[in-house]
Amino acid sequence: MRIILIGCGVVGQSFAQILVRREAELVKNYGFHPRVVAIVDRGGAAVNPKGLDLEKVLPLKAEKGTVALSSEGGRPDMSALDVIESVEAEAMVEVTPTNIKDGEPALSHIKTAFKSGKHVVTTNKGPLALALPALTELADYNKVYLRFSGTVGAGTPVLELAKKCLLGDRILSIRGILNGTTNYILTEMDEKHITFQQALKNAQKLGYAEADPSMDVDGLDAACKLVIMANWIMDKKVTLRNVKIQGIRNITLQALEEAAKKGCTVKLIGSINDDLKVVPTEISRHDPICVGGVLNAVTFFSEFAGEETVIGRGAGGLETASTILRDLLDIKQNLATKLVA
Ligand code: HSE
């Protein structure tokens, strides 16, 4: 499978590292021969139709900051859209930073890839939160696959558990902690009796929260994940506009202390019932989704199998990158089934 990699930050580089590390097993165990024929970053592109030598490109990226200075196919003049339109490949992996205002530039990358017949794997929540119903339609129209397992729960298989393991059942509702940074902040406030501002500073020092922590602390990141789950798992046609969102900036130590007296704590809970909500909520310490630190936890309420909870790390470069490989293998398996059907 020829792959174009758009975005070469932490997740993009981690994905390339996984391909290098697992090359032999991917061939042996799955008959999968991934070939990265182009990489695009802010400085331009590196293109080699025969497949880039990732063991050379990765150190160069680390040293010079861009793949475009590579002696092997370096193209500082080429944009992402040029590459997607002109380089032959079966799949595009889109890992540019999330933008929830208009989804760009990822939205254009994805649409262009579809139009040129390329399957898309992305970890970018922006385009999905704003336009997932339209994007799945466009993928179907162009007869290509769109996969995005890493957008919810990073490496924890949240979407796959519901979509694949509960195949044939019906998910009635979903409830969970979908953002690691806010969970870390609330856990710190609860356990160390420090204020929101102090806990936020700790989260920033540890690299969990961005300098502008709004996406996390105002509940937007969790809301994006909720939209993706509602569309993909429950077939609801919703976007970010349909979510009631309240962040954790106003959570006080007093609120946590009051909750503690009742054997409870406060968590930022995302839920999908008749409506979609991300709201700080008092929950029992015995609730299966009551996890600490940066963990995520999601409970599915299904018609037949009942309640199932999945818990795991919801962030991280390698964790998120591992889902790209899973999604590419899923596409490969789907294509193989189609050929024999
Ligand atoms: N910033 C997110 C979190 C990780 O803290 O959960 C990426 O989804």
Image: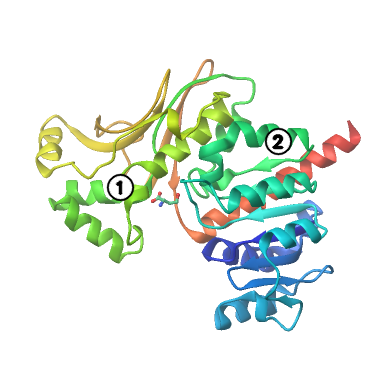
Task: Kindly identify the residue that appears in the image at 52 percent across and 65 percent down.
Answer: 10
Colouring rule applied to residues:
rainbow
Say what amino acid the circle numbered 2 marks. Leu
Residue 123 to residue 317: above or below: above
Q: Which mark is residue 217?
A: 1
Taking 29 as reference, is 7 left or right?
A: left
* Residue 36 position within the rendered picture, expressed as x and y whole percent measured from the top left: 74, 64
First in sequence: mark 1 vs mark 2? 2
Residue 42 to residue 127: above or below: below
Figure quadrant of the N terminus: bottom right
* Residue 60 position within the rendered picture, expressed as x and y whole percent measured from the top left: 62, 81
Outermost right residue: 340
Outermost top residue: 303
* Residue 280 position within the rendered picture, expressed as x and y whole percent measured from the top left: 26, 35
The answer to whether one can see residue 161 in this image is yes
Taking 158 as reference, is 92 left or right?
A: right
